[in-house]
Amino acid sequence: MKYTFRILAFSLLTSASMGVYAQTDVASNPVPQSTKASRAADRALSKQVRVALLKAKILDVPTISVRVKNGAVTLAGFVRDQSQIERAGEVAQTVSGVTSVKNAITIRQPGQ
């Protein structure tokens, strides 16, 4: 009888401890936003930033590239003077949905 009780107790403890380790991924891993939806949102935000740059009448907009990843905007390209670099960064920051702006625009002298 003691032997049967020990086996039963051991079996119950073993099966109870297995349930502790068997966790579902739903609780530990939140569902990420789909990649397709994320890319579409990034493209839309990039377009909004470009439109804002055009409306601000920054002269060298065609030479500025706008890249967006999860709301973080990166501006790159060439302009004629420092004031355009600063203005482009300010304009991009004002667009709704932009979380940060990395301004990698550089000055290119005419003829370069």
Image: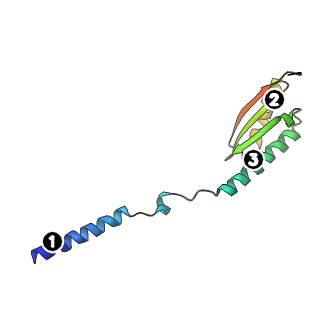
Q: Residue 90 shows which numbered tag?
A: none
Q: Is residue 11 above or below residue 59?
A: below
Looking at the image, the residue that sits furthest to the left is 2
Residue name at image x 83 percent, y 28 percent: 79
Helix, strand or loop at label 1? It is: helix
Residue name at image x 68 percent, y 53 percent: 38
Spatial distance from mark 3 to mark 1, Cα to Cα? Answer: 66 Å
The x, y position of residue 107, in whole percent, is 80, 24
Lower sequence index among marks 3 and 1 = 1
Q: Residues within 10 Å of mark 2 (few under 14, many from 20)?
A: many
Helix, strand or loop at label 3? It is: loop
Lower sequence index among marks 2 and 1 = 1
Q: Is residue 52 above or below residue 4?
A: above
Q: Is residue 21 above or below residue 108?
A: below
Three-letter residue code for mark 1: Arg
Closest to the camera, between mark 3 and mark 1, is 1
Q: Residues within 10 Å of mark 3 (few under 14, many from 20)?
A: few
**Residue indicated by mark 1:** 6
Left or right? Give the position of 97 relative to 26: right
The x, y position of residue 58, in whole percent, is 87, 34
